[in-house]
Amino acid sequence: MKPMVKKLAVVMTAAALTASLAACGSASNEGQKAGSTASSKPAKPTDISITTLAFAAAPTGELEAVKKLNEKLNVNLKLSWIPSAQISEKLNALLASRDLPDVLFIEDFNSTPAFLNAIDQGAFWELTDYVKNYPNLAKYPENVYKNASLKGKLYSLPRVRPLDGHESLLIRKDWLDKLGLQPPKTMDELYNVLEAFAKKDPDGNGTADTYGAVFPGSPGPSSYLLSLFGTGTKWKEENGGLTPYWWTPQAKEALINWNKVYKSGGILPDFPVLKTAQIKDMLVQGKAGLAIANVVDAYKYNVELQKTNPKANLVAFELPKAADGKAYYEQASGFYGQFLINKKSVDEAKLKKILEVYDYTASLEGYNLAVYGIQDVDYKLKPDGFVEQTEEGKKKGYSGDTTGQWVTGTFDKYLRAKVSGIPSDVFEANKKLIDSISSIPDPTYGLMNSAPFKEKGADWNKKLNDMLTNVIIGKNSIEDWDKFVKTYKDDPSFQQHVKETSDFFKEKNKK
């Protein structure tokens, strides 16, 4: 997945934006009249303007794939891209101009509060009752739409991603075999494996130069270090409301145990400064024998490992079970970025045509055409179903970084289980692993940030990350942790943050 773009600043007042996007009744009536044109005349193509972001240089000139889409769907697509580095500046200008396209990318609603007020005034289409009528869009998991919704209603088309497969145990199976160990099924077994990897020379080089796990600690410890113990995903649902996951007894249990593991060498000593991007390096260099990462990363990293160590065997396994006998996986949001549909410029007939376009590009055929161009010219399909771009296609500007940014995509549950060239037995094992997952969503997906969090959230998060890290490495004691938690439980501002977040949650989930 591409890195999140910089949060968008809003310079236009909500009132002005709402006024500029007010629904236009006359446009709707004209659209209905146009739809009744005599059948003897070919229907005029529907103009559809779409603005999205790009992570590379946008294509110049008209793409053959767009021509094909226009012909097939009887539309006239007008695509425009905003470079990701300029998206804040460009969207501010777009908002100030009061001239929005029919379809517009936003990263999330917390980034663009003016849009929320506009939504409340009916400026964008509410899509809840529409998407279910489009077969490919209807295939998106219910939780993806739920996570992208506001107050229980869908106002955007989410750019779909898998919900699961981003969390698995990547373990050096050859190290386990050498030490006579089995893949860990429980947290206690995990501790034993990590300590053995640190102390029993699993690589057999006679030097104490290995550690157990590589866990990223910068800019803060990954939330899975707590959620593995049953804390919930970022928040825990309790008594109809929400509690911060780090307030739970399970969070304290997690910190006590990770401190023990760290002291034994079971976690790389560079933990406080390691970033997620360094996981691969630590595994490929043989410094650590375990990580938590995408299921398919085990195969990808193993290919690199075997270039220097042909006997290496990095394998993906299920997460270990907590003390209550359950394995806790954090569910992903299932999307990155959303498309709003402008009610001022789009009547219902045009809305349905836009959804027809997005439904077709949510099929594999339509997606490949939109993103990669013409088959056997701009790309080729490999025997395993993966796309291989031609040099001609690349020169034209087709890529996931550009043409892939205006579509919502096809939903593939096993996207994080496969890569081109993966052996069929490894892929089947990866699919089985993903099928075994019962993950827990973050209940705050789709909720607005509380007023106190908008003011103090960055400071709160930094202090929390610092304390989590310091307790794990032993710089602060577990008693310090207890005092830290109590400070926030007693803080009126943080209490208000919890209350507002719980209220938003109840509003979104009320029947």
Image: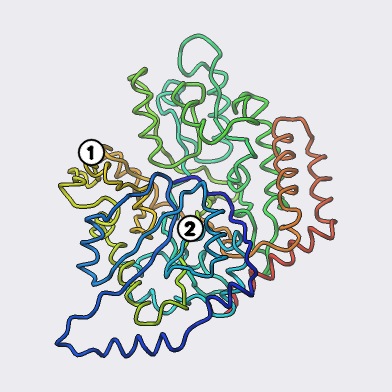
Q: Name the residue under label 2.
A: 337
Distance of mark 2 from mark 1, alpha carbons?
A: 29 Å
Give the number of the mark in front: 2 or 1: 1
Compared with 157, 280 (above or below) is: above
Q: What label sits on residue 391 in the rendered view? A: 1
Quarter of the picture holding the C terminus: bottom right
Name the residue: 38% across, 74% down.
131
94 vs 370, left or right, is: right
Near mark 1 (Cα within 10 A), the count class, few <14, some 14-19 or many ≥20, is few
- Using the rendered image of the protein, determine whether residue 327 is visible from the camera's viewpoint: no
Amino acid type indicated by mark 1: Glu
Amino acid type indicated by mark 2: Gly
Name the residue: 52% across, 62% down.
94
| Mark 2 or mark 1, earlier in chain | 2
- Using the rendered image of the protein, determine whether residue 57 is visible from the camera's viewpoint: yes
Name the residue: 17% across, 88% down.
39
Q: How many labels does the image show?
A: 2
Residue 304 drawn at (x, y percent): 37, 26
Residue 488 or 61: which is nearer the viewer?
61
456 vs 311, left or right, is: right
